[in-house]
Structures are given as structure tokens and as C-alpha cells.
């Protein structure tokens, strides 16, 4: 089948009410974006001072990784107070100012809500420990007696997603060993019991708290994990039971139907965005029903190798999955959990899965960079919304040589270094200058950046790339500006065009006003679309499209 027509959207990107159908959303990892107060950790003051960079880049929205009060055991995904900003980042007043300032620039705000677990410093968990076994204060969590003669073994064989057992034993108020509690991630992240009404009420209130402050969307962390099978039985990971004991259980849909009703109760629609790592397309689509979430991250696309057949298949599957529920697709290549795609695309194997991170594999940087440039034009031309992860506009690579003593990711420690973890994509951004901290922190900063920046990043700073027509940053700026000016891009009709093997070619818009061609064939090709090239990811060779190059064409 050469052509797939997606339905004409009800609302085009010019209708702001459904901004999330077409938006380019820039992900800010607050620890690493910009440090305003010189403590080596990014903060809201730093973001506010750099909003101009994002407006100039041309993004439509910002998603913030968690900025809440937290002991930072998992970089803020261990939340102690969902209604307060962590002092390391700033204050609630600053967050409110930031939301206002971004809105004034036409940029929407998405915050990250973490419902599966809280921090072990959250007052509920502190009280649960303090109150001891059998107390009602333990009910919002998963406390259980251990197995073995003295309860010295975990209640079941579940493993933490970060490595090691998913249970930690507590000490009773009298000092004796006590019950165990469940944590699918680090021990500092106790899982909440979503069968408890108090948990539901609390999160509905947290949603309203942020929506009342004007945020335009909520990114839902670990969205498929909330409900657990209360049997808490052992299972074999190589022969998974159906339904799974804690992933994608049907009961979780009730939670999101209630959240959708809250989002819909605001005059301007607010978007709910799911972090759902689910292999089954139909199960994933169920979360995108009109009464649940608005969009979900496209992890199948993120993990897809740089290969025309594989990409075409993922694109087709993505569109087929979203069309029946009338949800917009999303396109994403990097985030704070995965190795940066400039690096991935320079490897012999360009695929990614959560279990297969390939850190340290040999990398051809020039190749990765060329492909990442082409991938940008592909992403921005596909129908739906696009996520960009901070630093990809600078072409930052994965930093793979961070010394063990400086690493911070619990994944690294809980796997005893076997998994290098995610620090390599979280290194603070380079803004200007010749030496670290490259403008990330003020010149008189008291501390160095919380992760070391490679010296070679002097060539990657915003300052160094600005005005250089061949730089990654200028390509991003041109591409985003061009996308804004093309009404055929964002949400809307899509159709494949006939193309040689190894080449992706498609048109956009109901009148096929726009085309994109990506050459993954490994040899130069003549473009299968005649017309005016409005943007290329690299130079053309006397009209021929070199390998790993993409062009945007106005046919004619
Ligand atoms: C999500 C986040 C990740 C975090 C985990 C636990 O997968 O993206 O960074 O460690 O949830 O909250």
C-alpha cells in the first residue's frame, strides 16, 4: 500500500484550543538547563533568563521534568510535596511567574505529575513508618509481612525497574525489623496504593492545583504502572501472566477517565500526556480514547532503527493506532531516560530498548549527526506533535565517560555499574564561552555543574552555533520557523509517495502542498518529488540527494 490517508483533522493548528495536536514541545530537564544562582544545579531563575532562547527557537510548549520538593534520590521523580517547588529550583512564586512569562511569549507549559510513587520523605510515608504495622497510615502504600521464618525474605520475587528487589524491609518504631514495602523503582520511591480513595482524591487535587495555576498540560509519569494485582504473587518475567501483575491493568483506565473530566472542566482544554511504554498497539490506543488521555509518547518510533523499512512500518503502525481514536500521533527521539540520538544514530546498531542501551558502543559521530539532522526534518514533517529534548538542538552527544564517582543515577548504583544509567544525557547545557561551565552557571558560581561537561562542548554552545548556517542550532531554528509557516504541517493529511528502496517520501496537506524526502538508501538519489526545495538537512549534490539527507519540497 503506497498511500495512507489520515482523516482530515477537526481542528487545524490555527485553533489554539487543541494546541497539543500539532505542537512542538521542548523538554526542559531543570537540573541541567541553566543555573541562575551558581550552585551548579539548574533552576527556575535560569529558565526564566533563557526563555528568549526557546522563543527564538520557535517552540510551542515546554514540558518540565519534576520541579517539586524532593530529596532528589531519582532527580525529582521522588516527590515529597507535589504542591511545592524544590528550594534547589526556586519557589512557587517563581514558577507562577515563569508560567506567566512563557504564556506572554506564546509558549505553553506542561508539568510532570508522578502518581505511581512518592518520596520516602513524603509526609504520608513518614507517618506510615512511624505508625507501625496494622495502622491505617500504611494503607496508601503496599506494606506486607516478609516471607521466611522471621519475615526476612521479600513478600514476593518482583524486581525493581532500576535493579535489585522491588521490596525494602522497614524497621518498626520499637527498633525491630518490620514489614516490607513495595517500590517498583528505587527504595526512596514507595509505590502508592491506587485502590485507596485518599490516593485518588489527593492526585485529583494536585492536578487542579497546577491547572489552576495555568499549566496547559500534564505529563503523567509511569502512567501504566499505577494499579497492582493485590495478590502480589510471584511471576516469571520470561512467561508473563495476563493481565500483568502491575503493568497496564484495566483498572487504571478509571483513573484517567476521572482525570480527563477534570482537564475538560477548564474552559481552555488542557492536555494529558501519558508516559506509556507498552508493546501492544491496541492496548496503548485504549489510553487515547476520547474520554482519557490526549496523547502519549511514541516510544516505538524512538526505539526504531535508522532504516527506511523499519521506520515506514513504525510510521504506518503509529498512524493506524491513532486514527480510530482520533488522537494525534507524537514523534520523539530523545528524552532524559535514553541515550541521545546523535550518538545512537552513529552506531552499527541504531535501535534502542529500555533493556538494550548499548552505552559505550563504537560511534561514528559525523554519521550520527548527519542522520540526526535528517531525522529532524522527518519528525517535524510527520502528522501530529513533536517532542524535542533540551540540547538536541545543539547536537549534544551522549556523555559516556563520566567517572563512576561523579555519577548520580540510581540505575547505575542499583545495577552495580552494569548499567551506566542515564547521566550521560543529563549533562548541563553549554551556552557560551570556551571553558566549563560554558555559561550554564554564572561566572562567579560557587560550585561546578552537577555533572561534568566535556571540554569539546565549546564548539556546541548556543553562542558558537548562532549565525553559523551549517550548525545544528541554525537548522533547528530554520526548520521550526518553516514548520510554523506551513499550514500543511502538524496535524492533518499524510500520504506516502512512490520512492526507490531505502527512501521515505510523503506529502502533507489535503492538496499535497508539501513533501518530505529522506534518503536512507546509502547512495545518492534523484529526488522522487519535483519542486522547490525549501529546506535541506545538508547540501545537495548538483540536485542529487546524498545519503542520510532529508529535504522539504514544495511540489510544482
Ligand atoms: C519515568 C521517568 C524516569 C523516572 C521513572 C520513575 O520513567 O521518565 O526518569 O526515573 O519514571 O519515576
Image (spheres, rainbow, N blue to C red):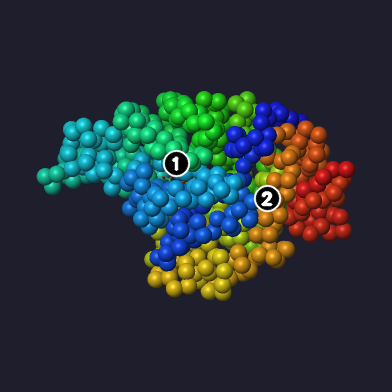
- Nearer to us of marks 1 and 2 is 1
In the depicted view, which residue is nearer to us: 87 or 535? 87
Q: Secondary structure at mark 2?
A: helix
- Secondary structure at numbered mark 1: loop
Identify which residue is drawn at 62% across, 28% down: 326
Image position, residue 401 (x, y; %): 49, 65
Residues packed near mark 2 inside 10 Å, few (<14), some (14 to 19) or many (20 plus): many
First reached walking from the N terminus: tag 1 or tag 2:
1
Q: Residue at x 82, y 45 (%)?
A: 554
Q: Which mark is residue 480?
A: 2
Are there few (<14), some (14-19), or many (20+) residues within 10 Å of tag 1? few
Q: Quadrant of residue 547?
A: bottom right
Residue found 73% across the figure and 33% down from its top: 493
Front one among 220 and 74: 220
Horizontal relation, residue 430 to residue 138: left or right: right
Measured along the vertical axis of the image, is residue 179 above or below residue 336?
Answer: above
Q: Quadrant of the C terminus?
A: top right
Locate the N terminus and report the quarter of the image it occupies: top right
Give how far across and how far down residue 41 sits, in percent. 42, 61
Q: Give percent across and percent down for residue 102.
A: 54, 49
Residue hosting label 1: 213
Amino acid at each position: 500500500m503506497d498511500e495512507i490517508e489520515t482523516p482530515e483533522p477537526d481542528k487545524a493548528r490555527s485553533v489554539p484550543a487543541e494546541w497539543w495536536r500539532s505542537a512542538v514541545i521542548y523538554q526542559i530537564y531543570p537540573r541541567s538547563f541553566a543555573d541562575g544562582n551558581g550552585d551548579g544545579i539548574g533552576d527556575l531563575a535560569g529558565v526564566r533568563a533563557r526563555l528568549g532562547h526557546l522563543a527564538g527557537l520557535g517552540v510551542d510548549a515546554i514540558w518540565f521534568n519534576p520541579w517539586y520538593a524532593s530529596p532528589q534520590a531519582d532527580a525529582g521523580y521522588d516527590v515529597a510535596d507535589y504542591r511545592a517547588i524544590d528550594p534547589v529550583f526556586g519557589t512557587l512564586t517563581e514558577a507562577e511567574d515563569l508560567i506567566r512569562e512563557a504564556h506572554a511569549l506564546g509558549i505553553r507549559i506542561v508539568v510532570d505529575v508522578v502518581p505511581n510513587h512518592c518520596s520516602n520523605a513524603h509526609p504520608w510515608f513518614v507517618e506510615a513508618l512511624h505508625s507501625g504495622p496494622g495502622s491505617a497510615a500504611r494503607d496508601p502504600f503496599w506494606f506486607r509481612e516478609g516471607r521466611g521464618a522471621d519475615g526476612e525474605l521479600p513478600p514476593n520475587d518482583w524486581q525493581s525497574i532500576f535493579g535489585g528487589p522491588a521490596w525494602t524491609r522497614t524497621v518498626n518504631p520499637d527498633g525491630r525489623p518490620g514489614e516490607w514495602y513495595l517500590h517498583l523503582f528505587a527504595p526512596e520511591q514507595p509505590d502508592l496504593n491506587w485502590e485507596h480513595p485518599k490516593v485518588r482524591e489527593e492526585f485529583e487535587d494536585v492536578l487542579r492545583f497546577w491547572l489552576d495555576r495555568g499549566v496547559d498540560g500534564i505529563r503523567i509519569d509511569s502512567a501504566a504502572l499505577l494499579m497492582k494485582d493485590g495478590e502480589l504473587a510471584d511471576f516469571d518475567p520470561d512467561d508473563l501472566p495476563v493481565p500483568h501483575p502491575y503493568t497496564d491493568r484495566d483498572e487504571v483506565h478509571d483513573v484517567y477517565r476521572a482525570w480527563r473530566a477534570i482537564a475538560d472542566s477548564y474552559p481552555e482544554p488542557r492536555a494529558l500526556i501519558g508516559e506509556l511504554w507498552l508493546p501492544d498497539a491496541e492496548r496503548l490506543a485504549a489510553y487515547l480514547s476520547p474520554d482519557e488521555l490526549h496523547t502519549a509518547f511514541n516510544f516505538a518510533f524512538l526505539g526504531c532503527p535508522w532504516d527506511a523499512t523499519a521506520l515506514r512500518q513504525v510510521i504506518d503502525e503509529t498512524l493506524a493506532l491513532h486514527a480510530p481514536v482520533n488522537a494525534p500521533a507524537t514523534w520523539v527521539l530523545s528524552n532524559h531516560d535514553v541515550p541521545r540520538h546523535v550518538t545512537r544514530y552513529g552506531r552499527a546498531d541504531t535501535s534502542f530498548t529500555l533493556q538494550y542501551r548499548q552505552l559505550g558502543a563504537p560511534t561514528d559521530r559525523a554519521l550520527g549527526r548527519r542522520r540526526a539532522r535528517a531525522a529532524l526534518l522527518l519528525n517535524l514533517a510527520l502528522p501530529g506533535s513533536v517532542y524535542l529534548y533540551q540540547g538536541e538542538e545543539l547536537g549534544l552527544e551522549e556523555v559516556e565517560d563520566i567517572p563512576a564517582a561523579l555519577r548520580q543515577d540510581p540505575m547505575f548504583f542499583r545495577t552495580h555499574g552494569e548499567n551506566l544509567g542515564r547521566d550521560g544525557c543529563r549533562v548541563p547545557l553549554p551556552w557560551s564561552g570556551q571553558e566549563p561551565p560554558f555559561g550554564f552557571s554564572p561566572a562567579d558560581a560557587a560550585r561546578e555543574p552537577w555533572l561534568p561537561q566535556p571540554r569539546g562542548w565549546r564548539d556546541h554552545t548556543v553562542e558558537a552555533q548562532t549565525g553559523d548556517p551549517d550548525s545544528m542550532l541554525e537548522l533547528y531554528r530554520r526548520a521550526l520557523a518553516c514548520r510554523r509557516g506551513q499550514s500543511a504541517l502538524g496535524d492533518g493529511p499524510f500520504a506516502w509517495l512512490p520512492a526507490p528502496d531505502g527512501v521515505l517520501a510523503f506529502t502533507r496537506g489535503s492538496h499535497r502542498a508539501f513533501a518530505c524526502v529522506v534518503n536512507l538508501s546509502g547512495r545518492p538519489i534523484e529526488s522522487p518529488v519535483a519542486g522547490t526545495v525549501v529546506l535541506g538537512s545538508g547540501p545537495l549534490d548538483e540536485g542529487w540527494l546524498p545519503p542520510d539527507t532529508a529535504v522539504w519540497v514544495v511540489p510544482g
